[in-house]
């Protein structure tokens, strides 16, 4: 069974700083998808970024980028120039036949 | 992006009653919808997969007789919590798949269920 582990329950940085959230996963599959989702206080799940495992190039969406290390089964999220609106829970997720397996989440706080 | 509407956003009910939660894809057809639950300060756990016109597929440990799922049309799936008890109090979230690829997966805004 696939498992997703986020080892940082909470993180806090100053506005405009760069922060990296870590995620590791376990699977025996060779082709799969990984995601980072953001859940702000409204609790709406918002897709941040998506990575296809067979693509070696790391996905990037504006200030958000990932460091995907397939051999190490690591999938970290880097947020550059952090903004107050980035404050939220962040969940790493693994796609299991279009059913998502989520990590425990990291509560990120951006301080002014 | 596409919109998934979930209703109600919050419901309080007495123990023993049943509660229905609706999940609608407003501007697309969703042959597959998913139901998750999230306990306070915890992650989302998949409960079941809902396919239009067929029986839902439940994850291990989820009581199908307690959590009734109906996907009667391509735009609507419902989750009914039957004979609710305080331990069923949780945040329930649906997601809907537009097409066959996960890049078109959209979440509802969730329903907070409180059972007294």
Image (spheres, rainbow, N blue to C red):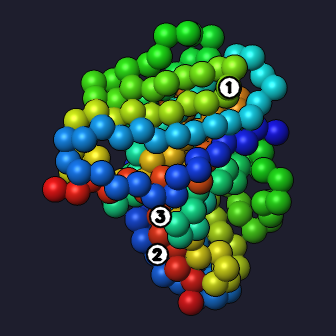
Q: Is B80 located above or below residue A79 in the figure? A: below
What chain letter is assigned to the residue under label 3?
Answer: B
Give the spatial CA distance, label 3 vs label 1. Answer: 37 Å
Question: On the image, numbered disc 1 is attached to which residue?
Answer: A72
Regarding residue A27, the answer to whether it shows in the image is yes
Rate crowding at label 2 as few (under 14), some (14 to 19) or many (20 or more) other CA atoms within 10 Å.
some
Residue in the picture at 82% in, 60% down: B61
Labels 2 & 3 near each other (Cβ < 8 A): yes
Q: Is A52 located above or below residue B73 in the figure? A: above
Q: Name the one closer to the observer, B25 or B110.
A: B110
Q: Is residue A22 left or right of residue A31?
A: left
Q: Is A28 located above or below residue B51 in the figure? A: above
Q: Outermost residue, left direction?
A: A112
Question: On the image, numbered disc 2 is attached to which residue?
Answer: B11
Residue in the picture at 78% in, 60% down: B62
What chain letter is assigned to the residue under label 1?
Answer: A
Of circles 3 and 1, the one toward us is 1
SS assignment at label 2: strand
Lower position in the chain sequence, tag 2 or tag 3:
2
What chain letter is assigned to the residue under label 2?
Answer: B
Q: Looking at the picture, how far across and down is residue B48, in whole percent? A: 70, 49
Question: On the image, numbered disc 3 is attached to which residue?
Answer: B111
């Amino acid at each position: 069974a696939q498992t997703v582990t986020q080892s940082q329950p909470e993180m806090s940085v100053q506005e405009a700083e760069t922060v990296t959230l870590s995620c590791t996963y376990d699977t025996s599959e060779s082709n799969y998808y990984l995601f980072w989702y953001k859940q702000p206080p409204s609790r709406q799940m918002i897709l941040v970024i998506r990575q296809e495992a067979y693509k070696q190039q790391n996905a990037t969406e504006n200030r958000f980028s990932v460091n995907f290390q397939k051999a190490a089964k690591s999938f970290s999220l880097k947020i550059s120039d952090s903004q107050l609106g980035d404050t939220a829970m962040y969940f790493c997720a693994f796609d299991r036949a279009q059913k998502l397996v989520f990590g425990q989440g990291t509560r990120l706080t951006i301080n002014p | 992006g596409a919109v998934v509407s979930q209703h109600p956003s919050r419901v309080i009910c007495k123990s023993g009653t049943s509660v229905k939660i609706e999940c609608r894809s407003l501007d697309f057809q969703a042959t597959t919808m998913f139901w998750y639950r999230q306990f306070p300060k915890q992650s989302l756990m998949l409960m079941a997969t809902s396919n239009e016109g067929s029986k839902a597929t439940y994850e291990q440990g989820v009581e199908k007789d307690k959590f009734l799922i109906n996907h009667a049309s391509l735009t609507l799936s419902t989750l009914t919590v039957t004979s609710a008890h305080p331990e069923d109090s949780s945040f329930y979230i649906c997601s809907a798949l537009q097409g066959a690829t996960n890049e078109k997966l959209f979440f509802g805004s969730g329903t907070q269920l409180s059972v007294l």
